[in-house]
Amino acid sequence: MCGIVGYIGHDPAQPILLDGLDRLEYRGYDSAGIATMHRGGICLAKEKGRLANLKARLRSSPLPGCMGIGHTRWATHGEPSDLNAHPHTDMKGDIAIVHNGIIENHARLRAMLQTHGCVFVSETDTEVVAHLLNHLWDGNMLSTLQRSLAMLEGSYALAVICAAEPDTLYCTRKDSPLVIGLSNHAQYIASDIPALLAHTRQIEMLEDKEVAVLRADGVTVFDAYGTRRPLRPATVDWDVEAAEKGGYAHFMLKEIHEQPAALQKTFSTYVDTQTMALRENTLPITAEEARRLSSLTIVACGTAYHAGVVGKYAIEHLARLPVVVDVASEFRYRQPILGAGDLFLAISQSGETADTLAALREAARLGAKTMALTNVLGSSIAREVGNSALYTCAGPEIAVASTKAYITQVEVMLLLAIDLAQKRGTITRDEAAALLSALSELPAQAEALLTDEGRIARFASRYYDRRHVFYIGRGMDYALALEASLKLKEISYIMSEAYAAGELKHGTIALIEPGTLVCALLTQPRLADKTLSNIREVKSRGAKVLVVCSQSLLEKTHSVADEVWPVPDTHPLLSPLLAIIPLQLLAYHMAVSRGCDVDKPRNLAKSVTVE
Ligand code: AGP
């Protein structure tokens, strides 16, 4: 969703701001703009559409100045247009702001400000903040901003510059991401870390309602009560290359190829590879707590939800603990029944998804023990659970379609299942060691699978014009089908549906007609014969069947499949980690064959910070 950047230093701000916006492009947007400070006045440029439009305009009339703010807007209030694009200003043009989030009481504030003579030029909720700052102006932006925040309801990440203080940039946040990049002679802000990596890896995180005052030579932070607090910079170990394409045609393809390394890094973070045992205390639940648990609730959105579904199968199987998985937007409004004795886990790659954050807060309010699994150090969701944050070590994921974050989320879910099972005494030490040893082999097996890409691309070039596709499977394979189907639809715009194979004949099989592509997943030996019967049912109705199966089940598929892609054998609980790879590549090549914008699919945003 919206992306924010800011810079204050001694170099021209415009190229730094545009470079930052380039790096945030993947978040999704439909207009862009920047404002700089020059000789005590604010200069402004904004354009509807892609960043290229803004850059074209700035080429002929660049904005001068060594401090500024920039924004990519994903429309919520008001259509994408030049006028609705950020930055927004007060009527005199002396205060400019950029905003991510939603000001929920904007209508009331707008009416109040209009009675004081404010004339609005946009339909956005954001513009009220610019006018409010002018309305409450007391000669000092820090106190004006602090008093204004007290009147705002909703979520915001805000960056502010004002002509009265031409050497200072202000920013603040609540329930919306914003990080500060520190360096000796210049300071930066951005919606997320990859946009800062070209300049610094020293990151200062802001808590809700904190205000940061940035000058070229340093940053001061005031807490929600207005008291100055010491800086607590964290060093991120992501490097610039991790957030660049590195020769691949798309970020998504690069990220698919980074999966073996991401699996390896995540594994060695949680497992001592010498003793092949889980490291002590990396999973924040004691044996006593694990034994007393009555249930686990997992809440997430989209791909992260699908990782949760895999987690449910694994945890129920290994740890014999009942697990409920829910999408966050449903969980938060369904008056969930949770309390002490229940464990709650939020999964979120970005750690900023608004619905997941709200669900987590609801679970904490109800008294459950809360944990979170995220890919981003210091993200809102991670901070909400303090020491109970688990991390995937996927590195920055830029493509909107999640791949390496998913695979590492699933990996951590399996590690959590093994840990809970050991602590609850439902598996032996030897069984745990066998599973961990199988997990340790996955990076090499995943690497080998990636060499199959040519065959997958050729298959995609034959089937890319299908109007709809079905993914079917049972058990873990059903969980996998959910994710494979989402990958295809979000980047190729092909209508696709994931179905529990045994459920097909209760209605959906009516949609199968000659030539319908059905991708059947067959990695669970215990359920293979059942799924094979379902494959025969669609085959006999004319479906073209692609089977993704474990090597040991290959022979069984010959009479039913039009195409078979075997994946290496592993423990059945781990097979999603391998079988998803050809399915990600299938989605990717289908989208490329259809000429789609793979990394930035239409209507989607990487980080969904509004509900
Ligand atoms: C994944 O391909 C999607 N783009 C999307 O479903 C995503 O997983 C979802 O929005 C949740 O995001 P999060 O993991 O950052 O919370």
Image (cartoon, rainbow, N blue to C red):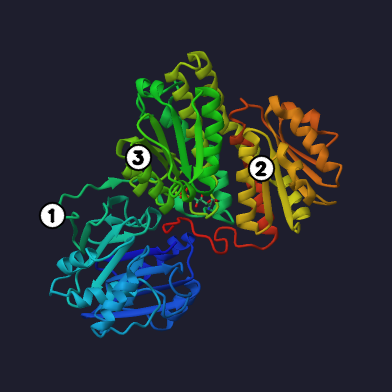
C-beta proximity under 8 Å, tags 1 and 3: no
Which residue is tagged 3? 366
- Packing grade of label 3 (10 A; few <14, some 14-19, many >=20) is some
Give the secondary structure at mark 1. loop
Residue drawn at (33%, 55%), measured in percent from left and top?
Answer: 175
Relative to 122, 543 lies left or right? right
Which mark sits nearer the N-terminus, 1 or 3? 1
Task: Tell which tag, 1 or 2, sits nearer the viewer.
Answer: 1
Residue 363 rendering spot, x and y as whole percentages = 37, 41
Which residue is tagged 1? 227
Task: Tell which tag, 1 or 3, sits nearer the viewer.
Answer: 3
C-alpha gap between disc 3 and disc 2: 41 Å
The quadrant holding residue 132 is bottom left
Point out which mark residue 582 bears.
Answer: 2
Which mark sits nearer the N-terminus, 1 or 2? 1
Which mark sits nearer the N-terminus, 3 or 2? 3
Locate the C terminus by quadrant: bottom left
| Mark 2: amino acid | Pro
- Above or below 249: residue 145: below
Relative to 553, 186 lies left or right? left
The quadrant holding residue 366 is top left
Residue drawn at (77%, 53%), measured in percent from left and top?
Answer: 463
C-alpha gap between disc 1 and disc 3: 31 Å
Locate the N terminus by quadrant: bottom left
- Above or below 98: residue 476: above
Residue 376 rendering spot, x and y as whole percentages = 39, 46
C-alpha gap between disc 1 and disc 2: 53 Å
| Mark 1: amino acid | Thr
- Packing grade of label 1 (10 A; few <14, some 14-19, many >=20) is few
Residue 164 rendering spot, x and y as whole percentages = 17, 77
Residue 521 rendering spot, x and y as whole percentages = 70, 37
Image mark count: 3
